[in-house]
Image (tube, rainbow, N blue to C red):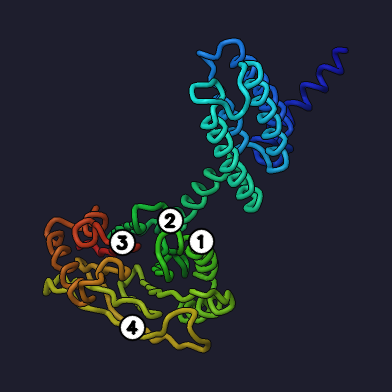
Amino acid sequence: MHKTMHRARTALRKSAVDYFRGDGSDWLALVGLMLTVPALACGTVAMPEWCSPAALVLPIVAGGLLLRPASLLGLYAASAVALLVESVQLGQDIPGPAGAAVTPGTVLVVAACGFFGLLIAQFRARVGVPWRRGGTMLFDLRERIRVQSALPRLPRGWHHEMALRPAGGQSFSGDFVVAARTNGGRTLEVVLTDVSGKGMDAGSRALLLSGAFGGLLGSLPPHGFLPAANGYLLRQDWDEGFATSVHLVLDLDSGDYELLSAGHLPALQLNAGSGRWEEKVAEGPLLGVYDAAEFHPVKGTLRPGDVLMLFTDGLVETSDREISEGIDRLTGEADRYVASGFEGAAWHLIEAVAKDVNDDRALLLLCREG
């Protein structure tokens, strides 16, 4: 008897663990909810002033979140029987007159909750992600994008700032950054990409591209990255599959850099000597538009005190503002940080120039300290 009880407890515990991981059967939840239905029915018959017939929506709503569609139909059948029993025991037939314990309104409320619960269960079954894991999965995906967008630690004398703001306050953005230190750590490669679309619509594609671009970065010569990325997008054959991207290759010893662009906005460099911002324009087509695209770099040097700014179009372009006007406004706000330093400036610059813009925004600052 002791061994039998031990095996039963072990099997029950394993079933519960598998269920809450989303891997097991839902029989345990079904049994629990099926037992709840007669308990509520008995409570309604015994104490109708405390337990309303509408209380049957509680196991129905829980079933919509916990059960598969086939199991949910069994729960609905038990709830319908319980509702009928309550009506008979309380001396009313369905539908009853106004003021009866089981009114047509009660039936409609229970039926409506059952209908929406079935829709939710069918959606979960089609997606294949239990509700218990759905929120966790989305949180994990968001954190993966955030971790992939983190820049590596830079040597002494260099400072970086980065901020990403999705459209509409959402958690997912079509803008992302991948970065790596290559050539024995002497070279910093950074890629800032703006995927077509915004927010959740572009978030899934941004997640896929960030993983692919992170694998390509550092595995290819600098001039081979954008052609490889362009070929990758072409192979996806997405309906809305283009993207803009800018690839920075920076020598951390000398400050010399190359900038390659795929239809992206120009970078901005602050020359510490003159105090002026200079546009760095590299030529290249959008990613994912046509094969055999060529990308021509522009070269420059970051001297002590210089700052290089990379950003996406959500920061400077709106329906009622030209890009040139947006760039002027951005550089004007950035001038406020020249004297005090750019530490923490990326987030504040987005707040200052594009706080209420319904588009994804990304800003990256690379500073060579004087």
The secondary structure type at the circle numbered 2 is loop
Q: How far apart are marks 1 and 3 (CA)?
A: 18 Å
Which residue type carries mark 2? Phe
The secondary structure type at the circle numbered 3 is loop
Name the residue carrying label 1. Answer: 204
Q: Residue 83 carries which label?
A: none
Q: Nearer the viewer, mark 4 or mark 2?
A: 2
Question: In the image, is 364 to the left or to the right of 55?
Answer: left
Give me the residue at 40% from left, 74% from top: 245
Question: Disc 1 or 2, which lies upstream in sequence?
Answer: 2
Which residue type carries mark 1? Ser
Name the residue carrying label 4. Answer: 282
Give me the residue at 42% from left, 68% from top: 197
Q: Which of marks 3 and 2 is in front?
A: 3
Name the residue carrying label 2. Answer: 172
Question: Disc 3 or 2, which lies upstream in sequence?
Answer: 2
